[in-house]
Image (tube, helix red, strand yellow):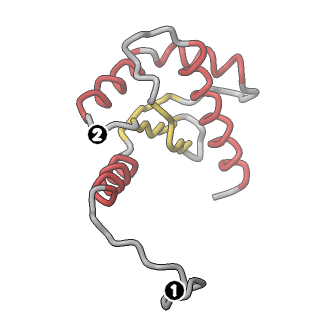
Amino acid sequence: MSKRFDRANSQIQKSIAKIIQFKMNDPRLNPMLFISEVEVTPDFKYCKVKVALDSKDEKELEDNIKILQCSQGFIKKELANMLKMPSIPQLNFVADKGTSATIRINEILSHLNIPKEESEGEDKDE
Protein backbone atom coordinates (compact mmCIF):
# COMPACT_ATOMS: atom_id res chain seq x y z
CA MET A 1 0.00 0.00 0.00
CA SER A 2 1.25 3.49 -0.73
CA LYS A 3 2.25 6.09 1.81
CA ARG A 4 -0.81 8.10 0.83
CA PHE A 5 -3.19 5.34 1.90
CA ASP A 6 -1.19 4.61 5.04
CA ARG A 7 -1.30 8.27 6.02
CA ALA A 8 -5.03 8.53 5.28
CA ASN A 9 -5.78 5.36 7.26
CA SER A 10 -3.73 6.59 10.20
CA GLN A 11 -5.31 10.06 10.25
CA ILE A 12 -8.85 8.70 9.94
CA GLN A 13 -8.21 6.16 12.71
CA LYS A 14 -6.85 8.80 15.10
CA SER A 15 -9.65 11.23 14.28
CA ILE A 16 -12.45 8.71 14.73
CA ALA A 17 -10.95 7.64 18.05
CA LYS A 18 -10.90 11.28 19.22
CA ILE A 19 -14.48 11.84 18.06
CA ILE A 20 -15.74 8.76 19.90
CA GLN A 21 -13.81 9.58 23.05
CA PHE A 22 -14.33 13.32 23.32
CA LYS A 23 -17.26 14.42 21.14
CA MET A 24 -19.83 11.64 21.32
CA ASN A 25 -21.90 11.95 24.47
CA ASP A 26 -23.69 8.61 24.15
CA PRO A 27 -23.70 6.84 27.55
CA ARG A 28 -24.43 3.51 25.81
CA LEU A 29 -20.93 3.44 24.31
CA ASN A 30 -18.44 1.43 26.33
CA PRO A 31 -15.42 3.57 27.34
CA MET A 32 -13.15 0.58 26.59
CA LEU A 33 -14.13 0.66 22.90
CA PHE A 34 -11.26 1.31 20.50
CA ILE A 35 -10.60 1.56 16.79
CA SER A 36 -8.11 -1.18 15.94
CA GLU A 37 -7.75 -0.61 12.20
CA VAL A 38 -9.05 1.52 9.33
CA GLU A 39 -8.97 0.55 5.65
CA VAL A 40 -9.82 3.13 2.98
CA THR A 41 -10.62 1.95 -0.55
CA PRO A 42 -8.35 3.25 -3.35
CA ASP A 43 -11.05 5.66 -4.56
CA PHE A 44 -11.54 7.05 -1.01
CA LYS A 45 -15.31 6.43 -1.21
CA TYR A 46 -15.55 3.74 1.45
CA CYS A 47 -13.79 3.07 4.71
CA LYS A 48 -13.92 -0.09 6.81
CA VAL A 49 -13.48 0.77 10.48
CA LYS A 50 -12.56 -2.21 12.65
CA VAL A 51 -13.80 -1.80 16.20
CA ALA A 52 -12.74 -3.83 19.23
CA LEU A 53 -13.69 -3.94 22.86
CA ASP A 54 -11.56 -4.96 25.84
CA SER A 55 -14.21 -7.44 26.84
CA LYS A 56 -15.28 -10.92 25.82
CA ASP A 57 -18.94 -9.86 25.57
CA GLU A 58 -19.63 -10.01 21.82
CA LYS A 59 -23.22 -8.78 22.21
CA GLU A 60 -21.96 -5.58 23.81
CA LEU A 61 -19.51 -5.10 20.92
CA GLU A 62 -22.30 -5.59 18.38
CA ASP A 63 -24.50 -3.09 20.27
CA ASN A 64 -21.67 -0.54 20.24
CA ILE A 65 -21.16 -1.08 16.50
CA LYS A 66 -24.87 -0.43 15.88
CA ILE A 67 -24.63 2.81 17.87
CA LEU A 68 -21.60 3.90 15.82
CA GLN A 69 -23.32 2.98 12.56
CA CYS A 70 -26.35 5.09 13.56
CA SER A 71 -23.99 7.96 14.48
CA GLN A 72 -22.17 7.78 11.16
CA GLY A 73 -23.49 11.15 9.96
CA PHE A 74 -22.21 12.92 13.06
CA ILE A 75 -18.83 11.17 12.83
CA LYS A 76 -18.47 12.05 9.13
CA LYS A 77 -19.31 15.69 9.84
CA GLU A 78 -16.69 15.84 12.59
CA LEU A 79 -14.16 14.10 10.34
CA ALA A 80 -14.77 16.73 7.66
CA ASN A 81 -13.97 19.43 10.24
CA MET A 82 -10.80 17.66 11.41
CA LEU A 83 -9.29 16.39 8.14
CA LYS A 84 -8.30 18.13 4.94
CA MET A 85 -9.70 15.63 2.44
CA PRO A 86 -11.64 16.32 -0.76
CA SER A 87 -14.41 13.99 0.43
CA ILE A 88 -15.04 11.95 3.53
CA PRO A 89 -15.55 8.23 2.82
CA GLN A 90 -18.67 6.26 3.73
CA LEU A 91 -17.90 4.60 7.07
CA ASN A 92 -18.64 0.93 7.70
CA PHE A 93 -18.08 -0.20 11.29
CA VAL A 94 -17.26 -3.89 11.77
CA ALA A 95 -16.13 -6.04 14.68
CA ASP A 96 -12.43 -6.84 14.80
CA LYS A 97 -12.43 -10.58 15.40
CA GLY A 98 -8.63 -10.74 15.61
CA THR A 99 -8.54 -8.56 18.69
CA SER A 100 -11.30 -10.59 20.34
CA ALA A 101 -9.29 -13.75 19.72
CA THR A 102 -6.17 -12.16 21.19
CA ILE A 103 -8.06 -11.15 24.34
CA ARG A 104 -9.41 -14.69 24.69
CA ILE A 105 -5.94 -16.25 24.21
CA ASN A 106 -4.42 -13.94 26.82
CA GLU A 107 -7.23 -14.86 29.22
CA ILE A 108 -6.55 -18.58 28.71
CA LEU A 109 -2.79 -18.13 29.11
CA SER A 110 -3.22 -16.17 32.34
CA HIS A 111 -5.12 -19.12 33.88
CA LEU A 112 -2.46 -21.71 33.07
CA ASN A 113 -0.22 -22.89 35.89
CA ILE A 114 3.21 -22.74 34.31
CA PRO A 115 6.09 -23.08 36.77
CA LYS A 116 8.56 -20.25 36.59
CA GLU A 117 12.06 -21.16 35.46
CA GLU A 118 15.04 -20.29 37.60
CA SER A 119 17.14 -17.52 36.16
CA GLU A 120 20.41 -18.60 34.59
CA GLY A 121 22.57 -16.23 36.63
CA GLU A 122 21.79 -17.84 40.00
CA ASP A 123 23.84 -20.66 41.52
CA LYS A 124 21.69 -23.72 42.19
CA ASP A 125 24.03 -25.00 44.96
CA GLU A 126 23.29 -22.19 47.41
Residue farthest to the bottom? Answer: 125
Label 2 Cα neighbours within 10 Å, binned few <14 / some 14-19 / many ≥20:
few
The label on residue 67 is: none
Q: The residue under label 2 is which amino acid type?
A: Lys
Quadrant hosting residue 67: top left
- Quarter of the image containing the N terminus? bottom right
**Residue 13, horizontal then vertical, whole percent:** 60, 36
Q: Residue at label 2?
A: 56
User: Viewer-nearest of labels 2 and 1?
Assistant: 1
Note whether 23 is above or below 18 in the view shown: above
Residue 83 or residue 101, whichever sits in front = 101
Residue farthest to the right? Answer: 84
Note whether 67 is above or below 109 in the view shown: above
Note whether 89 is above or below 26 in the view shown: below
Q: Residue at x 36, y 27 (%)?
A: 65
Q: Residue at label 1?
A: 126
| 123 on left or right of 117 | right
Residue 32 or residue 72, whichever sits in front = 32
| 38 on left or right of 1 | left
Label 1 Cα neighbours within 10 Å, binned few <14 / some 14-19 / many ≥20:
few
